[in-house]
Image (tube, rainbow, N blue to C red):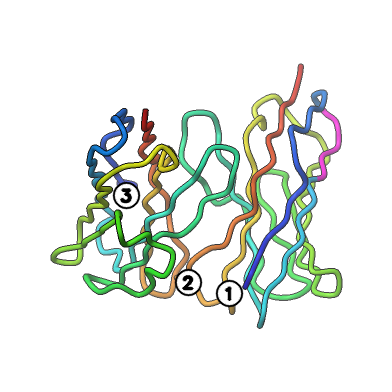
Amino acid sequence: EAGVAQSPRYKIIEKRQSVAFWCNPISGHATLYWYQQILGQGPKLLIQFQNNGVVDDSQLPKDRFSAERLKGVDSTLKIQPAKLEDSAVYLCASSLAGRWGSFGQGTRLTVV
Amino acid sequence: GDSVTQMEGPVTLSEEAFLTINCTYTATGYPSLFWYVQYPGEGLQLLLKATKADDKGSNKGFEATYRKETTSFHLEKGSVQVSDSAVYFCALSENGYAGNMLTFGGGTRLMVKP
């Protein structure tokens, strides 16, 4: 089966600009996650969706980050405006309900 | 809250050496425990998991045993290869419910020299 697809793979933006990342989960996976992985650290959950509803967004900086999963399939994560400390790899993962998930290759964001 | 602590790297070994990467955790309830591996330029891959105390997860020659008494899940391999060079992450899922979010440790970089 095709894995979790993410785009773009790399993005460089200036601070205060906006950026969006896209994730296409494995077909049929109801649960979708966005993680932030800062260099040298482990991934940290930003938001978890079940179908098109939010399960957990307690660690999402809502003043600048937003995410949506229209129709319960693809998802986008947006940052507006970006700060230097947002430089990280943004990982998307998906899973069947009640099953362990698979990760995409991630989008590496550099904010300059 | 839940947390995972792993030994800092990098860990540098010669080929065929024995590997141990330490991982300890703090959690309420009965978490499931995981090791993920991230090869250069690739995404996170599940290496092995254990869902209850005394379970042993194993894959590709790697193994780890869920030790509730010491809250540990150390990763071991008897003979490492150059191809094992990667970053290894220990993680837990609260209450062991599949589909719950994962809490990761900081990662340990392993470098294996020929």
Dividing the picture into quarters, in which one does residue A111 lie?
top left
**Mark nearer the viewer, 1 or 3:** 1
**Which amino acid, mark 1?**
Glu
Between A20 and B99, the one nearer to me in the picture: A20
- For the stretch drawn in magenta, the main secondary structure is loop
Q: Is residue B80 magenta?
A: no
The tag on residue B94 is: 1
**Which amino acid, mark 3?**
Glu
For residue B70, above or below residue B75: below
For residue A9, above or below residue B102: above
Q: Which residue is mark 2?
A: B100
- With B50 as the anchor, is B13 left or right in this view? right
Q: Which residue is mark 3?
A: A1
Q: Residues within 10 Å of mark 3 (few under 14, many from 20)?
A: few
**Residue depicted at 44% across the width and 49% down the height:** A36
Q: Does mark 3 fall on the same chain as mark 1?
A: no
Between A82 and A19, the one nearer to me in the picture: A82
Residues at marks 2 and 3, CA–CA distance in whole angstroms: 22 Å
For residue B59, above or below residue A88: below
Dividing the picture into quarters, in which one does residue A67 lie?
bottom left
Residues at marks 1 and 2, CA–CA distance in whole angstroms: 7 Å
Q: Residues within 10 Å of mark 1 (few under 14, many from 20)?
A: many
Q: Is residue B19 magenta?
A: yes
Dividing the picture into quarters, in which one does residue A74 lie?
bottom left
Residues at marks 1 and 3, CA–CA distance in whole angstroms: 28 Å
**Residue depicted at 74% across the width and 36% down the height:** B9
> Which chain does tag 2 point to?
B
Residues at discs 1 and 2 in contact (Cβ within 8 Å): yes
**Residue depicted at 66% across the width and 66% down the height:** B50
Q: Position of residue A17 (x, y in %)?
A: 23, 37
Secondary structure type for disc 1: helix
Q: Which residues are magenta?
A: B16-20
